Image (cartoon, grey):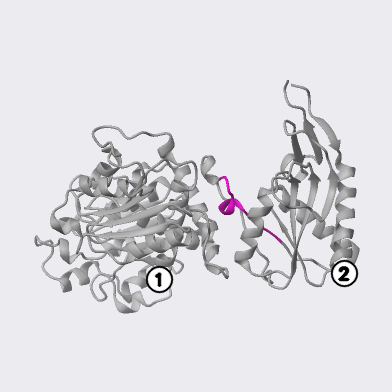
Amino acid sequence: MKPARTVLDAPDIARAVRRMAHEILESAKGTESLLLLGIPTRGVHLAQRIASEIATIEGSEVPFGSLDITLYRDDLRLREVRALEQTNIPVEGIDGRIVVLVDDVLYSGRTIRAALDALADFGRPAAVRLAVLVDRGHRELPIRPDFVGKNLPTSQAETVKVHMVEIDNEDSVTIQQASA
Amino acid sequence: MIGQHLLSAADLSRTDAVQILDTAAELASVTDRSVKKLPTLRGRTVVTLFFEDSTRTRISFELAAKRLSADVINFAAKGSSLSKGESLKDTALTLEAMGADAVIIRHPASGAPFRLATAGWIRGSVINAGDGTHEHPTQALLDAYTLRRHVRSGTGDLSGVRVGIVGDILHSRVARSNVELLTTLGAEVTVVAPPTLMPFGIESWPCSISFDIDDVLPSVDAVMMLRVQAERMAGSYFPNEFEYSRLYGLDSRRMELMPPESIVLHPGPMNRGVEISAEVADSPRAVVVEQVRNGVHVRMAVLYLLLGGLPESTTGELHEEGQVG
């Protein structure tokens, strides 16, 4: 197997996160009704980073939390039972807010489909947007991101991995070629 | 993972038990949402098969299954084929033919859930909701969950936590399951009862034994008062209720002996004035109502962990004489 190739390093990720924070602010016209929800596990750390970038840019705090989608997955019965991750919806709730879902990699779109179902059970947001660090293509559902760190054309045989300091001791995005 | 069935608290490793309790803590938040339902077990069928009267355990399981979107069928002994003398096997074969993915069974005979799970009559999961004087594992899980939220400032670690279980240990499946589970989780359990209500072989249980409640109360983090089960009192185990209450009942005077942060549990239904006085039952230190609420979350966790993944029936085949269809 070939070694994994690094496509984004730590400064690249920092720049991408900063740009996404600006784009989110621009599209939401400020922080007024904004709410960031990360999808565990790396999406949560990404949401936290975007929130702190926004705080630096605008000087006002944006509520952020986490949304575990395990119980809404469409492939639960295809695998061993999965452990649950934390769901933490800020006390403000999601009603009438612009909710930005944050995930590390967008691939089939099935995770986001599950997240949309989960959100509907928590309330009725004014709008739902999607921010991802990497869009690697190969969608299986009619879902597209609003804010993208990096578009990364891949083959389905390849593996894309996002590493974050909070979990993996380093910031990087790597792509692993399939073994021939 | 906890396997296909939940028959006994003694079967659970510490990892299994902690996983159930952590899952329950996540599932508890569903109660705070606008839609109190999850789609997770959509299309699964859960049967409650109750050969003994029980309201709270059955509706707790029913609510837990419904919160996870499973279809629930209630099969009670009264007014069904069970009262016409149908055998457990034929009932099981009927439920299998109807496609039950899980059977939650309460039975007066100890070991009935084990028989149902291992005889090869059904493919689905079996959950023990109380069998004879043997076990009631989900009650122990909800008690452990409640303890985790209260003792040690809610940090969730029960290592070294001291729990007194007081009352009819002899007939109590709640006591047996709690001794097993709490010990697995690292707690130190002391059972307290008159000698006539101690089971034979209690010395081999992983707990301390006392005959004097006043001796035990000053050092507990929690005390669990068991119900005096009139329906199991065919023999004379104590002279009368007043004597029992005087010697083993928890009243305000005795509660004063307990450390200030300690709590009082009771599996319900309570006999006010017998094992627990009305003042204690209504005091903020009694967490009886919270136990009921936590029971739903713990049962949701058990159902999710048993039914939420790959169906066992695709790997396990029916064996023995129980082939159906």
Q: Is residue B77 left or right of residue B126?
A: left
Q: Residue at x 69, y 69 (%)?
A: A94
Magenta stretch encompasses residue A36: no
Residue B129 visible, this orientation: no
Q: Which residues are magenta?
A: A65-75
The answer to which of B13 and B309 lies nearer the viewer is B309
Q: Residue at x 33, y 62 (%)?
A: B58
Name the secondary structure under disc 2: loop
Q: Residues within 10 Å of mark 2 (few under 14, many from 20)?
A: few
Rendering coords of residue A99 (x, y %): 74, 64
Q: Residue at x 24, y 66 (%)?
A: B248
Q: Is residue B1 left or right of residue B107?
A: right
Type of amino acid under label 1: Val
Q: Are marks 1 and 2 in contact (CB under 8 Å)?
A: no
Q: Which part of the image, by quadrant, shows the C terminus of chain B?
A: top left
What residue occupies the far front of the structure in this picture?
A: B325
Type of amino acid under label 2: Lys
- Chain letter, disc 1 residue: B
Q: Do discs 1 and 2 belong to a common subunit?
A: no
The residue carrying mark 1 is: B289
